[in-house]
Image: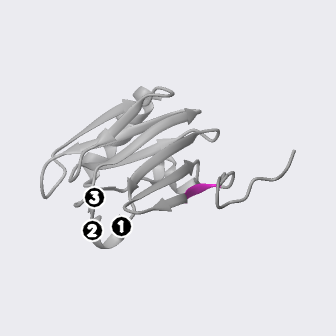
Amino acid sequence: MAKISEKLLEVRQHTGSGYLPLVDFASWRVAILNFADELRLEKITRLQRHNETDEVFVLLQGRCLLFIGSGADQVIRIHGVNLEPRKLYNVRKGVWHHHTLSVDAMVLVVENRDTTYDNSPFCELTAPQLQELRELGRELL
């Protein structure tokens, strides 16, 4: 079979740890998020939000627990959602979030291409919030 030119078809994969954008086009980006040590439940200390875009997650394999924080300038309450394979989860613009993954997890991420740390602030969690997040994580995992 003849090789197809990348001008016609791009084929990308990510088998290493953590987050890696694979396709950037116009205003959107597709990435893969795999397990990384910093995503362990006990290492989470803050939530992040994206001020200019929604962010979509699709669990491809393994387990992923998505934490959602309600509140505007500060996290008021933390919720946890176990992602189900092949379901699309759209975290709305401005919503605090973070996730923990199993070591075999792979998550598809779709977001705006201009999503950066400049428009994605973090909120450090208080000691009681960290305890709540870890208890919720242990309960759901």
In the picture, the disc for residue 50 is 3
Amino acid at dot 3: His
Quadrant of the rendered image containing residue 117: bottom left
Query: Which residue occupies 23% across, 51% down?
Result: 93
Query: Which residue occupies 37% across, 56% down?
Result: 45
Q: Residue 75: x, y in percent?
A: 19, 50
Q: Is residue 132 left or right of residue 29?
A: left
Most frequent secondary structure within the magenta stretch: strand
Which residues lie in the magenta part? 17-21
Q: Name the residue under label 1.
A: 114
Marked residue nearer the N-terminal end (3 or 2): 3
Q: Residue 63: x, y in percent?
A: 53, 33
Rendered position, 97 above or below 116: above
Quadrant of the rendered image containing residue 114: bottom left
Between marks 3 and 1 in the image, the one whose residue lies nearer the viewer: 1
Amino acid at dot 1: Asp
Q: Which of 25 and 39 is in front in this view?
A: 25
The answer to whether marks 3 and 2 mark residues whose Cβ atoms lie closer than 8 Å is: yes
Amino acid at dot 2: Asn
Q: Are there few (<14), some (14-19), or many (20+) residues within 10 Å of tag 3?
A: many
The Cα–Cα distance between marks 2 and 1, rounded to whole angstroms, is 9 Å
Q: Name the residue under label 2.
A: 119
Quadrant of the rendered image containing residue 27: bottom left
The answer to whether marks 2 and 1 mark residues whose Cβ atoms lie closer than 8 Å is: yes
Label 3 residue SS: loop
